[in-house]
Amino acid sequence: MNETSIPSGRPHRSPYGRGHHLRRASHSGGRLVVRGKERLSDNVVLLRLGDPEGRPLPGWSPGSHIDVVLPNGLVRPYSLCGDTTDRDEWRLLIGRETESRGGSAFVHDRLDRGDHLDYLGPRCRFRLRGAGRYLFLAGGLGIAPLIPMARLVAASHLPWSMVVVGPEADVAPITAMLTDLLPRITLLPTGEDARPDLTAPLTGLDPGTAIYACGSDRFVDAVEQISSRSGLTVNRQLFTAGTPRGGDDKPVELVLARSGLTFTVQAGTSLATGLRQLGVRVPVSCGAGICGACLVKVVAGVPDHRDRLLSTEQRGRGDSILTCVSRAHTPRLVLDL
Ligand code: FES
């Protein structure tokens, strides 16, 4: 769906339904060609991607991402940051991760114009909801999904502002490209001597303000902590996760409700890996519990949620699980597979 207006603030749909949609959608996708790779700083590149045959690309809404299947076999989720009305070209901002597991390093060092990539999606787990005014908070490249959101809000003539926190060398070239949005963007540079305080932008907000934050887990945690003092909730998306809780893993017996298969995933092996070893394919992208690609519906049993994506409400319902990091409180889980 190509979104031209902001959806009203209806309650979230059931994670069952969203999970189902996600799993089906995650199998959609196709092939892309790299039309351009622009280096914005030592750590940031802008990729321009199109259909190899010049056909229109699928529509997407602000906050969507695609799972890119890199030629080295790694799958990585990246937010779409371009224009939602542009069916000819997608844009991705990709930072070089200091502890790259091979994804961002490949994009920075080896991917070139003319190369082909497979992708899954687009999928949206970071949806813009109706509100009276908006505050967008970006930690570094967390600005990517917030750009199309801000454009949609601006087009709707609603009040908004954006605060971008990060190394000036990396974020200034990005904001400089956003000439249409620039007057409402505040840059708070980080560095050895600069540790910006997020308290000021999050103080005195109108109660009707919707806060959207995207960045590292530490950045988003800080935003949530400050916002909670004023009773404001944060719509969040992480692009890095802390180390998932582990060490107390126990074997989990998995029952696949549709096929009747039963098997045990040993401690130290993720449920997604256990499923894959049995030949059951569950899409895995981030592998860190932050993108939603590996979500599976739970029919019975109690999940031990270790992700950073599901809401408190979704966790309480216990009817879905992110199989790349989460486990089970009960010895057995029955999955809708
Ligand atoms: S693969 Fe991203 S949440 Fe599991």
Image: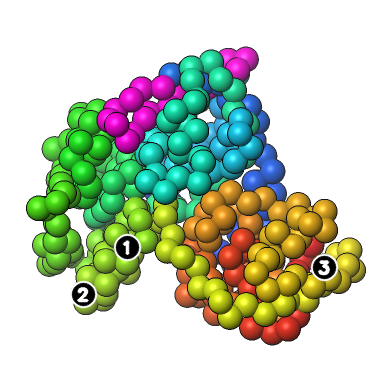
Asked if residue 87 is positioned above or below residue 242 in the image, the reply reads: above
Q: Earlier in the sequence, mark 2 or mark 3?
A: 2
x then y, percent, for residue 134: 26, 54
Instruction: Give the residue furthest to the right.
Output: 260
Dot 2 amino acid type: Ser
Residue at the image position 82 percent from the left and 53 percent from the top: 279
Mark 2–mark 1 Cα distance, whole angstroms, equals: 20 Å
Dot 1 amino acid type: Arg
Mark 1–mark 3 Cα distance, whole angstroms, equals: 36 Å
x then y, percent, for residue 133: 24, 55
Q: Quadrant of the C terminus?
A: bottom right
Q: Which residue is mark 2?
A: 230
Dot 3 amino acid type: Leu
Figure quadrant of residue 174: top left
> What kind of element bears circle 3?
strand
Q: Are marks 2 and 3 in contact (CB under 8 Å)?
A: no
Q: Which residue is mark 1?
A: 218
